[in-house]
Amino acid sequence: MKLLIVEDEPQLLKSLEDFASKEGYLYDSSKGFRSAAERIALYDYDCIVLDINLPDGNGFDLLEALHKEGKTNGVIILSARDSLDDKLKGLGLGADDYLTKPFYFSELNARIKAIIRRKQFKTNKIVHFSNLVFEPDQHLIGVGNLDNPISFTKKEFALLSYLINNHKRVLSKVSLAEYIWGDYVDEAQSFDFLFSQIRNLKRKLKEAGADVEINNVYGIGYQIKAL
């Protein structure tokens, strides 16, 4: 699961980044409207944690842009203003939830997980794909059941989840790399790190007896299919 954190207050941004890292989320962060808009245009996020008051714009404008582009990112608004009008406006523009500052990170985490279940996994806590069984909240994947879950690293789990959630389309190498590694992908000299993760996934799925196959679509990227 990948988050975009949009917050201009340095101390709160650092706290939100620490929270995301501790909870095992992949994340990118932006301090302003323009940089957030650029990231939203380029990358896919499961949930956007969005401050309303930004130095070069506001969160409502970002919500309007998401709505016009038909994007289905989950959005939680953060605001210091406990105003009913602001809440109604944000929810009316497509936000999924609204938290007033200050807030508890445990509450934010619960709301993020609820949004991810609704948006990405269609409200099912247990997700099935072929003979694979997922428990998204606990980062568990097993064959047939969850009694003996397959051992995946955090990035392997995120990559496999992303492939399965988009199993009806071919995902480019660039989109996969950007989803998993975010800004750090620009530092890579090649896609060898992605190929290594794909090889590991294929091996682990085969050893576990999973009836799925990750296919390399020449010149484009990868797609996962049920056998």
Image: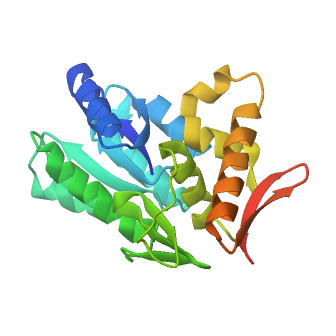
| Nearer to the camera, 222 or 139 | 139
- Give the image location of residue 83, x and y in percent: 10, 52
| Image position of 136 (left or right of 79) | right
Q: At 15% across and 52% down in the image, what residue appears?
A: 107
Q: Quadrant of residue 55?
A: top left
The answer to whether one can see residue 170 in this image is no
- Give the image location of residue 119, x and y in percent: 43, 67
| Image position of 145 (left or right of 80) | right
The answer to whether one can see residue 123 in this image is yes
Q: At 65% across and 53% down in the image, what residue appears?
A: 201
Q: At 78% across and 27% down in the image, what residue appears?
A: 190
| Image position of 47 (left or right of 181) | left
Q: At 29% across and 52% down in the image, what residue appears?
A: 76
Rendering colour mode: rainbow
- Give the image location of residue 52, x and y in percent: 27, 41
Q: Quadrant of residue 131?
A: bottom right
Q: Against 104, is 149 above or below? A: below
| Image position of 77 (left or right of 31) | left
- Give the image location of residue 33, x and y in percent: 41, 33
